[in-house]
Image (tube, rainbow, N blue to C red):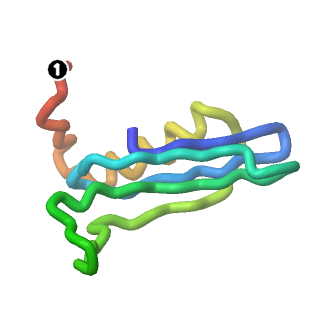
């Protein structure tokens, strides 16, 4: 999965990398105080050198949602179904 979600009875936040190429990345969050979280995505730029430009080849999504983990999964599932024509599967998939 290329997303994380945090939710409570008040609502949730969905944070994702809409990356059809499924590149290596780190998606993380941390508690940043009362009613606050810190979000980050680290993208691997390959042979990146100091001063070189690294362009992130995907969109980063931050959006509110109502519900729980299942509802967050449905947001990601809908993106996959819309983006990957013909149900394209990950090359490393075993199922």
Left or right of residue 14, residue 76 in this image = left
Left or right of residue 22, residue 74 in this image = right
User: The residue tagged with tag 1: helix, strand or loop?
Assistant: loop
Left or right of residue 64, residue 94 in this image = left
Residue at the image position 27 percent from the left and 47 percent from the top: 24
Does 6 sit above or below residue 53?
above
Residue at the image position 83 percent from the left and 38 percent from the top: 9
Q: Nearer the viewer, residue 60 or 26?
A: 26
Does 30 sit above or below residue 59?
above
Residue at the spot of label 1:
94
Count of marks, rendered view: 1
In the picture as drawn, the residue positioned furthest to the left comes out as: 91
**Residue 5 quadrant:** top right
Does 51 sit above or below residue 4?
below
The quarter of the picture where the N terminus appears is top left
Q: Nearer the viewer, residue 92 or 65?
A: 92
Q: Nearer the viewer, residue 78 or 43?
A: 43
Residue at the image position 47 percent from the left and 45 percent from the top: 3
The x and y percentages for residue 14 are 59, 50
The x and y percentages for residue 42 are 40, 55
**Residue 77 quadrant:** top left
**Residue 70 quadrant:** top right
């Amino acid at each position: 999965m290329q997303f994380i979600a945090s939710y409570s009875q008040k609502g949730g936040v969905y944070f994702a990398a809409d990356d059809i190429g499924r590149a290596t990345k780190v998606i993380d969050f941390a508690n940043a105080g009362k009613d606050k979280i810190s979000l980050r995505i680290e993208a691997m730029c390959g042979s990146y050198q100091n001063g070189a430009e690294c362009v992130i080849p995907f969109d980063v999504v931050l959006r509110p949602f109502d519900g729980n983990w299942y509802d967050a999964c449905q947001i990601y599932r809908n993106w996959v179904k819309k983006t990957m024509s013909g149900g394209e599967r990950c090359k490393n998939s075993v199922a």
